[in-house]
Image: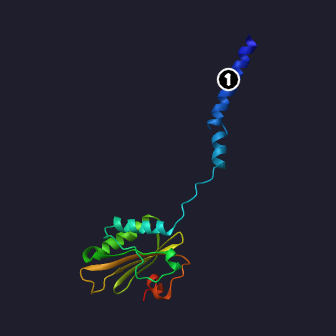
Amino acid sequence: MGTRRATAAAVAVTGILTAVAGCGLGDGGATDSAAKASPPAAAPFTKETVANEVGAAADDSGLPPGDDSMAGLPEGEWRTCMAPWMADAPEAEAADAFAATVKRLRTLGWKVTTSRDEQDVTLRTLTKQGWRVYARHYTMEGFGAEQPVSFTAVKDGCELPDEVQGDFSDNPA
């Protein structure tokens, strides 16, 4: 009878150790599993993702609702690699809201690669994961009590038509 109890105890201990090891609580369970696990795949950084980041940053910064349509731009395949956003902001708030939007984009991982102030326009270019955002704030007279602000995202390698190419580069005409 003592042998049966010893066998039963050994079987019980073996079962417990197997259960503990299977849960990753034993010596090699957690380490082996972690070493074999692959990192989660990053979500693709699509036109929609970029447009959502830019739009949300502008909204969070106090800019008025923007126009993200491509109305008035030439037709073509190139539209799949561009995401425009523009609005007319109240003159008294436009500069601060523009700067706050750029700052917000930076907190989202966008890097400022170009920063210039010209006579009537503030220009910033931001980059992230194969995209560029051409940020512009225009202070020209003739717009009344509002000033145009735009954030246009263009995917690297996008072949823009000649008629818009100068509008979406680091050297606007």
Can you name the residue that lies furthest to the top here? Answer: 1
In the displayed structure, 63 sits above or below 168; it is above
Residue beneath label 1, please? 12
Q: Foreground residue, 77 or 15?
A: 77
Image spot of residue 1 (x, y percent) = 74, 10
Q: Judging from the image, what secondary structure is the residue with disc 1 in?
A: helix
- The colour scheme used to paint the residues is rainbow
Image spot of residue 63 (x, y percent) = 32, 70
Q: Quadrant of residue 17?
A: top right
The quadrant of the picture occupied by the C terminus is: bottom left
Q: Foreground residue, 84 or 10?
A: 84
Q: Quadrant of residue 26?
A: top right
Q: Foreground residue, 69 or 12?
A: 69
- 140 relative to 23 in the view: left or right: left
- 73 relative to 1 in the view: left or right: left
Q: Quadrant of residue 91?
A: bottom left
Tell me how many marks there are.
1
- Name the residue located 54 percent from the left edge and 82 percent from the top edge: 159
In the displayed structure, 143 sits above or below 13; it is below
- Name the residue located 41 percent from the left edge and 69 percent from the top edge: 54
**Mark 1 Cα shell of 10 Å, populated few (<14), some (14-19), many (≥20):** few
In the displayed structure, 87 sits above or below 16; it is below
Image spot of residue 78 (x, y percent) = 52, 79
Residue type, label 1: Ala
